[in-house]
């Protein structure tokens, strides 16, 4: 059974930065586009960013220019560098494939507040 484990969240002031990590059990990243998603309270889960196996990326308009997604397939890990954080970035962040085929992990809470 594939397991995705997200980490790196926390409480940060507006304008601050965080780096999230998503580690997968087993060698599942090979050629699989991976993404970061988030769900704010009372909202649906939304796509934040995608990174393909060749390094191509996609970002939601709300995070473009502030977030950077990357991957290390040798470590079965996907990263999300988040800069210039805003209160509206507050959410639980999850990783999964672009087609969301893996079981969801527990996510990591990001809270942006002064």
Image (tube, rainbow, N blue to C red):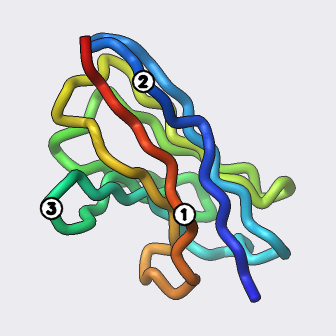
Q: Label 1, on which residue?
A: 106
Q: Label 2, on which residue?
A: 11
- Mark closer to the chain start, 3 or 2: 2
- Looking at the image, residue 1 lies above or below residue 106: below
The residue depicted at 65 percent of the width and 67 percent of the height is: 4
- Report if the CB atoms under discs 3 and 1 are less than 8 Å apart: no
Q: Residues within 10 Å of mark 2 (few under 14, many from 20)?
A: some
| Residue 50 drawn at (x, y percent) | 43, 58
Judged from the image, the secondary structure of the residue bearing numbered disc 3 is loop
- Looking at the image, residue 24 lies above or below residue 68: below
| Quadrant including the N terminus | bottom right
| Residue 78 drawn at (x, y percent) | 63, 52
Numbered marks: total: 3
Q: Residues within 10 Å of mark 1 (few under 14, many from 20)?
A: some
Horizontal relation, residue 85 to residue 108: left or right: left
| Residue 43 drawn at (x, y percent) | 15, 61
Find residue 47 and report its image quarter. bottom left
- Looking at the image, residue 50 lies above or below residue 61: below
| Residue 11 drawn at (x, y percent) | 42, 24
| Quadrant including the C terminus | top left
The answer to which of 89 and 42 lies nearer the viewer is: 42
Q: Label 3, on which residue?
A: 43
Q: CA distance from mark 3 to mark 1?
A: 17 Å
The residue depicted at 17 percent of the width and 34 percent of the height is: 88
């Amino acid at each position: 059974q594939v397991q995705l484990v997200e980490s790196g969240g926390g409480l940060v002031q507006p304008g601050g930065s965080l780096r999230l990590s998503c580690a997968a059990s087993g060698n599942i990243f090979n050629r699989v586009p991976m993404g970061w998603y988030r769900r704010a309270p009372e909202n649906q889960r939304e796509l934040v960013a995608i990174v393909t196996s060749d390094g191509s990326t996609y970002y939601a308009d709300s995070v473009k220019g502030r977030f950077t997604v990357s991957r290390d397939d040798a470590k079965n890990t996907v990263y999300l560098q988040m800069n210039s954080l805003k209160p509206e970035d507050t959410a639980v962040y999850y990783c999964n494939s672009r087609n969301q085929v893996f079981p969801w992990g527990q996510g990591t809470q990001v809270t942006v507040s002064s």
